Image (cartoon, rainbow, N blue to C red):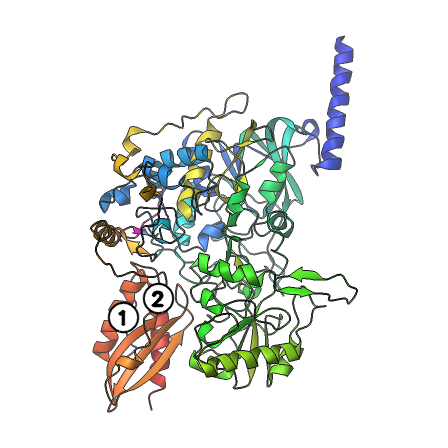
């Protein structure tokens, strides 16, 4: 072929490539024609729990890094989390507390084939196991402070739980030095993201804030290296305001408001966009039940999981990995709401001190399932509410979801074409329930946006309800009235409930009556793009896409909760991206470094007997390592043990009150883990006892704080107690609950 013909052939090929990109893959320009606005060696998309450590590692390894973040501030889901590091392989904190762990033991636990590990990619797990203790040490050196408490283990699967970890790997970040203007509350997660962000800014790494990555650009539509991204301006402007929100730190922010920008990556692009569970189209590809009513995604309204990283990568040839990890038992990453009557009912939530409170609007109320029932759009009960009593006990709640998500089978249009629906779900209760729980029903729930309704009669209540996203399906007043009547009859008879419910303490009979949003929340994304051990994204043929990496919840391969997996995969991705050769392939060594191997654990990684796979009994509750080891030793000796359940709820205390004494209850919905309920016992006008009757505060932190607070309150016979350092949220909630109880004393 002549030189002239060759040039013509190249032009035609490039033109054809452009047409394919524009028509089929939404990339707005050809690689050869792009005018780049910014340039770096490594471009990190997202500045959250994955993007920040990935950028730090790539920078440390000599790459020029640029971070592109869609939001007004850094942090993502990690910033509003409980700050659980969840790391193993013999970390510095495990060593400090004499927790025997190793890279091999971590790998063993996460390839066992049970719930949280059965679908894990073994190459990815091996790589994460090899680097986890190293990554943990790295981020501590970059400013993260870990609370000085003994590591914990949570609901291990061999004890009847769902967690893969057989050794204590849960540690929590100390965030006391950081203001959290994102949530307005003292979430520990800000102690992960702020120090890493500050380290990057101190190192001179630039941030392009308020730019949403729309497209990843390859040399050719489906081949060649990834050479950059296209992003669009995405400022956050609150209702009633005109100016965009600004970030907590500003040093290093690039001043740019151009509608679209192109960012060139000379070495690599790392996708750290945070997962896909918030994208309706994406999630219903995997679980069609998860319709638009699941609008209260964990992390929102600050942090979304819009699937943008996965979708952009898929459009240039990437594959999804370990997609079955999207599922947990009988549901995707779904959890029962921690608060009802509001849109965003996941976890600890936000308050009026949050910058985005205008979007959050309402904190809702912490449900007391003893005092309410849950119904579907028609007004029918759709499961046993006993299964929802502890929202952290996911396997139990999935039993509820399995019936609730297919409970509406209706020919809504009357044309003979019945359809099946699952949500939204509603909690029904009366004024007596609100009074028992100290719920302020004038302010706590969101009437304005259709997440709560109130009426004087059950029939009027049903008529008022508008089923968000399914307004054509009406709640039937007769059905709801019959549902309430059947439930009240079961309470009267102390049994015979339609769903086998055992919590039959209170009727629903004292108006006014309430119907509040109780639809479950979508939590983390636990499946993503397929990668190899270098966190390099693979295509549909299983081959690495040159110069493209993914980390955190954008990356598949590991189904495990907590920030340890996120940070470690990001550490690997940053190291790998900085090491790419001229072909865009990572060259960094994945081998386990001897200094991070941990002690010998062959005695804990056996597979040659059925007993190594059978459940052995024991407690499913969160425990410190030493307490769990004592329990295991007792089981090994064949001794009877006291099984501690997952929920941390004490009895009411009424039966143990002194003869002739009166008890007064108070509650607060503002604890770190949900409701804190307090009971004060009074005799002859004098306080003789104070006890916490219910809480779900963090083991090793909140529970210890409550013990100190109760002791001080008993001594002072007052709610004027000092907040416990490191447990401010728990302390404030205790004081609120105790104050309400004391206010009821005549």
Residue toward you, 738 or 229: 738
Find residue 33 and report its image quarter: top right
Badge 1: few (under 14), some or many (20 or more) residues near its Cα, within 10 Å?
A: many
Residue toward you, 732 or 172: 172
The percent coordinates of residue 307 (x first, y second) are 59, 46
Question: Is the C terminus in the top left, top right, bottom left or bottom right quadrant?
Answer: bottom left
Residue placed furthest toward the top: 2
- The main secondary structure of the magenta stretch is loop
Residue bearing the label numbered 1: 709
Residue at 54% x, 36% y is: 530
Question: Is the N terminus in the top left, top right, bottom left or bottom right quadrant?
Answer: top right
Find residue 480 and report its image quarter: bottom right
Residue 585 visible? The answer is: yes
Relative to 567, residue 359 above or below: below
Badge 2: few (under 14), some or many (20 or more) residues near its Cα, within 10 Å?
A: many
The magenta region covers 142-152
Q: Are marks 2 and 1 in contact (CB under 8 Å)?
A: yes
Find residue 342 and report its image quarter: bottom right
Q: Secondary structure at mark 2?
A: helix
Residue 46 visible? The answer is: no
Q: Which mark is residue 521?
A: none
Q: Earlier in the sequence, mark 2 or mark 1?
A: 1
The percent coordinates of residue 723 (x first, y second) are 30, 68
Residue toward you, 517 or 303: 517
Q: Which mark is residue 730?
A: 2
């Amino acid at each position: 072929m002549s030189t002239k013909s060759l040039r013509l052939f190249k032009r035609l090929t490039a033109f054809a490539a452009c047409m394919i990109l524009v028509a089929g893959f939404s990339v707005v320009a050809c690689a050869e024609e792009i005018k780049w606005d910014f340039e770096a060696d490594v471009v990190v998309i997202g500045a959250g729990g994955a993007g920040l450590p990935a950028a730090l590692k790539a920078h440390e390894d000599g790459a020029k890094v640029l971070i592109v973040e869609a939001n007004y501030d850094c942090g993502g889901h990690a910033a509003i989390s409980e700050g659980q590091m969840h790391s193993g392989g013999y970390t510095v904190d495990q060593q400090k507390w004499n927790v025997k762990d190793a890279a091999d033991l971590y790998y063993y636990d996460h390839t066992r084939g049970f719930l949280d590990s059965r679908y894990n990619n073994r190459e990815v797990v091996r790589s994460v196991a090899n680097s986890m203790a190293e990554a943990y040490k790295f981020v501590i050196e970059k400013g993260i402070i870990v609370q000085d408490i003994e590591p914990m283990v949570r609901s291990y699967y061999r004890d009847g739980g769902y967690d893969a970890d057989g050794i204590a790997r849960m540690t929590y970040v100390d965030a006391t030095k950081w203001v959290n203007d994102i949530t307005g509350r003292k979430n520990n997660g800000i102690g992960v993201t702020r120090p890493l962000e500050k380290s990057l800014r101190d190192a001179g790494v630039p941030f392009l804030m308020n730019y949403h990555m729309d497209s990843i650009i390859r040399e050719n539509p489906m081949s060649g290296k990834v050479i950059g991204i296209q992003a669009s301006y995405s400022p956050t402007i609150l209702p009633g305001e005109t100016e965009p929100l600004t970030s907590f730190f500003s040093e290093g922010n690039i001043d740019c408001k151009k509608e679209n920008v192109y960012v060139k990556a000379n070495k690599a692009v790392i996708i750290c966009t945070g997962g896909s569970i918030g994208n309706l189209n994406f999630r219903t590809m995997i679980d069609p039940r998860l319709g638009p009513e699941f609008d209260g995604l964990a992390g929102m309204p600050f942090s979304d999981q819009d699937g943008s990283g996965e979708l952009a990568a898929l459009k240039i040839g990437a594959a999804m990995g370990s997609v079955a990890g999207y599922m947990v038992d009988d549901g995707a990453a779904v959890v029962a709401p921690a608060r009802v009557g509001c849109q965003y009912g996941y976890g600890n939530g936000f308050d009026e001190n949050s910058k985005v409170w205008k979007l959050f609007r309402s904190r809702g109320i912490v449900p007391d399932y003893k005092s309410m029932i849950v119904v579907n759009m028609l007004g029918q009960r759709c499961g046993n509410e006993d299964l929802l009593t502890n929202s952290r006990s996911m396997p139990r709640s999935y039993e509820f979801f399995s019936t609730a998500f297919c409970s509406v089978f209706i020919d809504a249009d009357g044309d003979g074409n019945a359809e099946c629906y699952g949500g939204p779900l509603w909690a029904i209760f009366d004024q007596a329930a609100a009074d028992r729980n100290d719920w302020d029903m004038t302010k706590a729930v969101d009437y304005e946006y259709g997440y709560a309704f109130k009426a004087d009669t059950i029939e009027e209540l049903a008529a008022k309800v508008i089923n968000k996203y399914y307004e054509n399906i009406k709640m039937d007043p007769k059905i709801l009235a019959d549902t309430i009547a059947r439930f009240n009859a079961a309470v009267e008879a102390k049994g015979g409930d339609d769903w086998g419910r055992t919590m039959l303490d209170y009727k629903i009979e004292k108006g006014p009556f309430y119907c509040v949003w109780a639809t479950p929340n979508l939590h983390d994304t636990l499946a993503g793009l397929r990668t190899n051990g270098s966190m390099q994204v693979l295509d549909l043929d299983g081959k690495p896409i040159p110069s493209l990496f993914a980390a955190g919840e954008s990356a598949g391969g590991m189904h495990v909760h907590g920030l340890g997996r996120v940070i470690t995969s990001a550490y690997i991705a940053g190291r790998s991206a900085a090491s790419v050769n001229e072909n865009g392939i990572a060259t960094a060594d994945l081998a386990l470094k001897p200094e991070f191997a941990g002690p010998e654990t062959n005695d804990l990684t056996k597979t040659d007997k059925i007993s190594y796979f059978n459940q052995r009994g024991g407690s499913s509750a969160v425990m410190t390592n030493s307490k769990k080891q004592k329990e295991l030793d007792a089981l090994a000796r064949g001794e009877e043990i006291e099984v501690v359940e997952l929920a941390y709820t004490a009895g009411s205390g009424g039966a143990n009150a002194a003869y002739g004494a009166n008890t007064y209850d108070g509650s607060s919905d503002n604890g770190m883990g949900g409701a804190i309920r307090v009971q004060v016992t009074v005799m002859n006008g004098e306080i003789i006892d104070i006890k916490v009757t219910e809480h779900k505060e963090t083991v090793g932190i909140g529970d210890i704080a409550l013990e100190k607070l109760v002791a001080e309150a008993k001594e002072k016979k007052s709610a004027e107690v000092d907040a416990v350092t490191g447990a401010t949220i728990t302390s404030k909630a205790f004081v609120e609950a105790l104050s309400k109880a004391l206010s009821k004393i005549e």
